[in-house]
């Protein structure tokens, strides 16, 4: 079962500069987000999971059809653009 949520998340750009808090739309499966609408693009879970080194939180890699990528926490509280 999936759930759809509108979230306000802290976004960090590719150069590790904070972009501030932004609103995203996200669909979650039983583990974390599998689809995210962010900054005018739709990102899908790539199947790759990891841990953000600086914070130690679990993340998922997301990508657009044009291969723009980001990492998002499983709870959808933070995004790191890649």
Image (spheres, grey):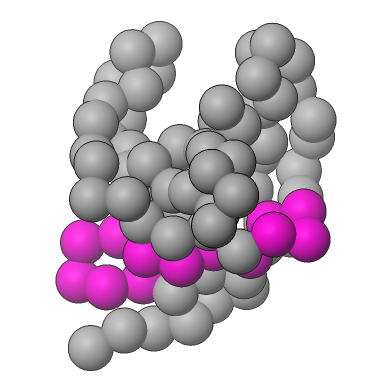
Q: Does 64 sit left or right of 29 as displayed? A: right
Residue 20 placement, left or right of 13: right
Quarter of the figure with the C terminus: top right
Residue 14 location, x and y as percent?
A: 65, 20
Figure quadrant of residue 71: top left
Q: Is residue 30 above or below residue 22?
A: below
Give left or right: position of 26 versus 16: left
Establish if 11 lies above or below 74: above
Q: Which of these two is toward me, 54 or 62?
A: 62
- Considering only vertical position in the picture, is 81 above or below 9? above
Q: Which residue sits furthest bottom? A: 1
For the point 66% across and 27% down, the residue is 12
Q: Quadrant of the N terminus?
A: bottom left
User: Residue 17 in magenta?
Assistant: no
At a point 78% along the width and 61% down the height, the residue shown is 40
Q: Is residue 77 visible?
A: no
> In which image quadrant can residue 81 be found?
top right
The stretch in magenta equals: 28-41
Residue 61, given in percent of the width and then of the height, sits at 38, 41
- Whether residue 3 is visible to the viewer of this picture, yes or no, is yes
The answer to whether residue 39 is magenta is: yes
Q: Quick one: 52 or 47, which is closer to the camera? A: 47
């Amino acid at each position: 079962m999936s759930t759809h949520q509108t979230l306000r998340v802290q976004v960090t750009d590719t150069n590790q500069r904070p972009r501030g808090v932004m609103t995203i739309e996200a669909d979650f499966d039983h583990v974390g987000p599998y689809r995210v609408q962010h900054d005018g693009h739709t990102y899908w879970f790539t199947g790759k999971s990891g841990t953000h080194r600086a914070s130690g939180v679990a993340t998922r890699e997301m990508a657009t059809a044009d291969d723009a990528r980001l990492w998002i926490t499983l709870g959808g509280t933070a995004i790191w653009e890649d």
